[in-house]
Image (cartoon, helix red, strand yellow):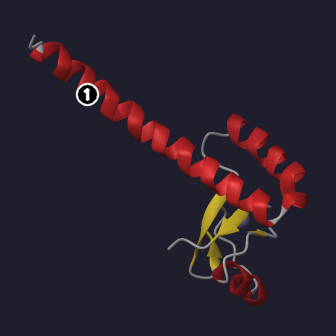
């Protein structure tokens, strides 16, 4: 009952689709975390998600890079950076994306 060639082909497909799934899962985890923390952000999140479906380059979430938004590269105010580092989500003042601290 060995179907080696068929297994190899489907494994390649699985590898590709599982990395896609990981991206979706990561987004779902971020959405869940955000809404648990800030239920009032739901409307904005939905707007950003709708926007990110149209623009494939952009997503509703971006990690903070140093003191900059990794989506638009604008500097984030230091008071906001403190919040992100404390585990909160903030919105970029420039592109309104949700910024989070990447461990
Ligand atoms: Zn930004």
**Ligand 1 rendered quadrant:** bottom right
Q: In the image, what residue occupies the spot 77% across and 89% down?
A: 79
Asked whether residue 85 is in view, the answer is yes
Q: Name the spot of residue 81 as percent of width and height, x first.
A: 69, 83
Residue 59 located left or right of residue 23: right
At 33% across and 29% down in the image, what residue appears? 14
- Left or right relative to 84: residue 57: left
Point out the residue furthest to the front here.
1
Local crowd size for mark 1, using a 10 Å CA cut-off: few (<14), some (14–19), many (≥20)? few
Instruction: Say above or below: 54 vs 23.
Output: above
Task: Please give the residue where the numbered disc 1 appears in the rendered image.
Answer: 12
Q: Nearer the viewer, residue 73 or 78?
A: 78
The residue closer to the viewer here, 85 or 80, is 85
Q: Could one spot residue 97 in this view of the protein?
A: no
Image quadrant of residue 93?
bottom right
Quadrant where the N terminus sits is: top left
Q: Name which quarter of the figure residue 70 lies in.
A: bottom right
| Nearer to me, 31 or 96 | 31
The residue that appears at 74% across and 61% down in the rendered structure is 34
Q: Is mark 1 within 8 Å of ligand 1?
A: no
Q: Is residue 33 above or below residue 79?
A: above
Q: Residue at x 68, y 78 (%)?
A: 84
Q: Is residue 4 left or right of residue 93?
A: left
- Circle 1 SS class: helix
| Residue 36 against residue 89 in the figure, above or below | above
Residue 86 image position (x, y, % from top left): 67, 83
Give the mark count.
1
């Amino acid at each position: 009952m060995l179907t080696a060639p068929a297994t190899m082909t489907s494994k390649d497909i699985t590898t590709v689709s599982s990395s896609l799934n990981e991206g979706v899962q990561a987004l779902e985890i971020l959405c869940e975390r955000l809404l648990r923390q800030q239920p009032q952000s739901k409307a904005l999140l939905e707007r950003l998600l709708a926007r990110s479906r149209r623009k494939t380059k952009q997503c509703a979430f971006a990690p903070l890079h140093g003191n900059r938004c990794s989506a638009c590269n604008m500097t984030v105010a230091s008071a906001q950076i403190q919040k992100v580092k404390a585990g909160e989500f903030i919105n970029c003042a420039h592109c309104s994306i949700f910024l989070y601290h990447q461990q």
